[in-house]
């Protein structure tokens, strides 16, 4: 096989900008040097060349100078309402291929309320919600407590803690004030789903028609050919129900190596099938490509009914830590193989192999 020259585009935590008023968890999404080194090593182990380029404003020049055949893009960006879509937009302009989802998907899925509007149109289950741009907007009558408050456009549990679960107007307004002031973006208020925490990773691309409303009807075929589903992973939150209650930034970072990750999740086979189908449907309607992870909560008060919380088209790839990496390991796929699966999926999509 041809040897490909691969530029790994990411934003290192250590290169993140620092400015007055930046919150403690502001750059929690960004990558460590060891993750980037592991990704480069994995690509080299697959017989290709790989080098890291910081995905900042110099990228237009550095990527042209590097002359990659393809970029392995995991850049999260720093600023703006579509920060994850900025590097793909530049690569489109330069006509350089890259792994993973494109501009529209990355801009859309960073914005949780926008994504939920699309899911709702397709009849896919996601908690009822309301978006707030001001602290004093009236709460819709249908939004009964307990509710859950989070930033619209963050990840890695940023802005999320035990206080995100609100039980009355006072708690709601306090949490809205905190989110609007700290993250400078609309707050998303959802019905609180008391339940189990499950995430489903997948690598691949759908083959088949993509333009229909999903699900068209109960008997319509569930199109998921072309996708490789990793075993679902459950994060056991029981020990943290009184301190965190949910999978927040503290658990995802400081306590990440102490959590119990159950993979495959101990859930019935028919629920696994349902989750895989829902993950495929979300992947399809958001236009995701090559790789994604879909986060769910299973409602313990309603027979484990699954609710889609979000889709992550740039799932973390830290060896031994990131959810997708743990899921792949449970399927016998190590970090090196996972990285190469993503790269090969993209090369195939571009018909480069
Ligand atoms: N509506 C909700 N009901 C209950 N818990 C929620 C809800 N939304 C989010 N959470 C909790 O917060 C965590 C992070 O939320 P999520 O929307 O996945 O954001 P992030 O991008 O930070 O991962 C979830 O994994 C879950 O534990
Ligand atoms: Mg999540």
Image (cartoon, helix red, strand yellow):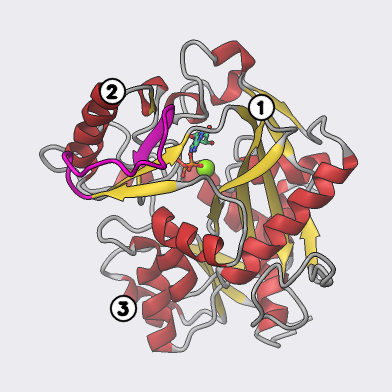
- Judging depth in this view, the residue of 222 and 80 nearest the camera is 222
Task: Farthest residue to the right: give it.
Answer: 269
Q: Which region of the structure is painted magenta? A: 133-150
The N terminus lies in quadrant? bottom right
Taking the spot 35% from the left edge, 74% from the top edge, the residue there is: 62
Q: How many marks?
A: 3
> Dot 2: what SS?
helix
**Quarter of the rendering containing residue 345:** bottom right
**Quarter of the rendering containing residue 303:** top right
How far apart are labels 1 and 2 at the CA level?
23 Å
Q: Is residue 140 magenta?
A: yes
Task: Farthest residue to the front: give it.
Answer: 141
The image shows residue 255, relative to residue 4, as above or below, that is: above
Taking the spot 39% from the left edge, 82% from the top edge, the residue there is: 64
How far apart are labels 1 and 3 at the CA level?
54 Å
Write down the residue under mark 2: 171
> Dot 3: what SS?
helix
Label annotation for residue 61: 3
List x then y, in percent, for residue 77: 34, 58
Write down the residue under mark 1: 301
Q: Are marks 1 and 2 in contact (CB under 8 Å)?
A: no
């Amino acid at each position: 096989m041809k040897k490909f020259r691969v530029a790994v585009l990411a934003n290192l935590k250590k290169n993140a900008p620092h400015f007055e008023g930046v919150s403690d968890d502001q750059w929690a999404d960004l990558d460590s040097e060891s993750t980037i080194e592991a990704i480069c090593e994995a690509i080299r182990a697959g017989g290709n060349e790989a080098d890291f380029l910081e995905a900042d404003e110099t990228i237009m020049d550095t990527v042209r100078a590097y002359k990659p055949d393809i970029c392995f893009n995991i850049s999260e960006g720093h600023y703006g309402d579509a920060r994850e879509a900025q590097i793909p937009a530049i690569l489109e302009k330069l006509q350089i291929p890259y792994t993973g989802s494109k501009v529209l998907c990355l801009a859309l899925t960073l914005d949780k309320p926008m994504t939920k509007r699309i899911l709702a149109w397709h009849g896919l289950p996601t908690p009822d919600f309301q978006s707030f741009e001001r602290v004093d907007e009236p709460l819709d009558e249908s939004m009964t407590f307990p509710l859950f408050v989070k930033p619209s456009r963050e990840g890695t549990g940023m802005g999320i803690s035990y206080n995100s679960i609100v039980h009355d107007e006072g708690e709601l307004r306090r949490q809205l004030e905190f989110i609007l002031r700290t993250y400078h973006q609309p707050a998303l208020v959802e019905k609180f789903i008391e339940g189990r925490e499950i995430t489903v990773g997948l690598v691949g691309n759908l083959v088949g028609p993509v333009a229909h409303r999903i699900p068209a009807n109960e008997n319509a075929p569930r199109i998921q050919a072309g996708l490789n589903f990793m075993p679902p992973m459950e994060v056991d939150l029981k020990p943290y129900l009184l301190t965190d209650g949910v999978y927040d930034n503290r658990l995802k970072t400081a306590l990440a190596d102490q959590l119990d990750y159950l993979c495959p999740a101990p859930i019935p086979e028919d629920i696994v099938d349902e989750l895989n189908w829902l993950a495929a449907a979300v992947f399809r309607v958001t236009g995701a490509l090559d790789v994604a992870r879909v986060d769910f909560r299973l409602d313990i008060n309603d027979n484990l009914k699954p609710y889609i919380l979000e889709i992550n088209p740039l799932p973390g790839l830290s060896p031994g830590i990131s959810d997708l990496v743990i899921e792949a390991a449970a399927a016998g796929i190590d970090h090196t193989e996972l990285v190469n699966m993503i790269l090969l999926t993209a090369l195939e999509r571009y018909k480069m192999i």
